[in-house]
Amino acid sequence: MPVCVAETSGTEVLRPHAEHAFAAELAALAAQDDRPRPDRWKLSPWAVATYLLGGTLPDGTLVTPKYVGPRRIVEVAVSTLATDRALLLLGLPGTAKTWVSEHLAAAVSGDSTLLVQGTAGTPEEAIRYGWNYAQLLAHGPGRDALVPSPVMRAMAEGMTARVEELTRIPADVQDTLITVLSEKTLPIPELGQEVQAVPGFNLIATANDRDRGVNDLSSALRRRFNTVVLPLPESAEAEVDIVTRRVDQIGRSLDLPSLPDGTEEIRRVVTVFRELRDGLTSDGRTKVKSPSGTLSTAEAISVVTGGLALSAHFGDGVLRPGDVAAGVLGAVVRDPGNDRVVWQEYLETVVRERDGWGDFYRACREVSA
């Protein structure tokens, strides 16, 4: 049965790539950026950092922050890409590794789509190259029959390639990157040829701390990366700010109601996640057990976005405790046995006793019953 694929413009897609969603900011930065740029970079390192961290340009253009965190982390990441060393963004799930890698590639190369998604089934061809078998059978081995990987394209065009979840890729496939990163060459033995990287090429990989022991990087490969660790938000206020910004962006793309600034439900979700994650209440007085899940900032964003959709389609458009309670339960209770006990204990000993949280407690009790 034939499948019809409709063409879509940049405004019609559900989630535009960073270089399209923030095209106006990138263009304004490029127009006012008079600092030296490495070969084939669209912006100078200073402008790339400004794009990620936000700021106001001389002409009054407001650049929104894409990453809320220590400035030095972004500066180290950007300066790494300006050298011949690849960049490894490491951290817990939900610390914006993928988000940062996408925006770095968009600002440096103007294209964040040269992406290899790491999974347990990622083949070597995803990093090296594959073959168009119709061409191969008809004409034999040749460059016309070769299907370049995103990494090969980035090498040939002097752009930034991305490898997501590097430690989920089998170890023998990971090591395909060693020659690419050390010699800046990708051999094609079938043709007796090679692709050599041109200036501007570099690679950003991401990996999370929870995957240690799945497919650990070999020491030879790890040496080819400069590792930057992305931490969890330092304070509850910073995490509330991150969640609010992202939910607002996602909500606009989904035509959901606008989110009031400083909404109490976001603060409650963030507080619950931080306390269960840290094993300690925010006042430092009560120790609590931690569930098996990560309870990351990304999961808080998902819970609040889901709650906003509930309030829009089945409520009055105002985010209330009942809209986020089910999402909180689903995020906390991953193991129905142990996690449910942890959640019930936290609900009764912490949430129940907290002033002003009665409506949140009752909503959580209702969905937990």
Image (cartoon, rainbow, N blue to C red):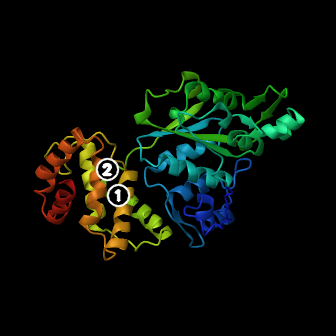
What is the three-letter code of the residue carrying label 2?
Answer: Ala
The answer to whether 231 appears left or right of 353 in the picture is right
Query: Is the C-beta separation of discs 2 and 1 under 8 Å?
Result: yes
Q: Within 10 Å of the Cα at label 1, are there few (<14), some (14-19), or many (20+) other Cα atoms?
A: many
Residue 108 horizontal/vertical position (percent):
65, 51
Residue 81 — which label?
none
Residue 248 horizontal/vertical position (percent):
43, 67
Mark 2 falls on what kind of element?
helix
Image label count: 2
Q: Quick one: 301 or 367, which is closer to the camera? A: 367
* Residue 238 in sight: no
Q: Which residue is mark 2?
A: 331
Q: Within 10 Å of the Cα at label 2, are there few (<14), some (14-19), or many (20+) other Cα atoms?
A: some
Q: Is residue 171 above or below residue 254?
A: above
The numbered mark, 2 or 1, whose residue comes first in the sequence reads 1
The answer to whether 247 appears left or right of 295 in the picture is right
> Residue lying furthest front in this view?
1
Q: Is residue 54 above or below residue 182?
A: below
Q: Is residue 232 above or below residue 310?
A: above
Q: Quick one: 60 or 254, which is closer to the camera? A: 254
Residue 303 — which label?
1
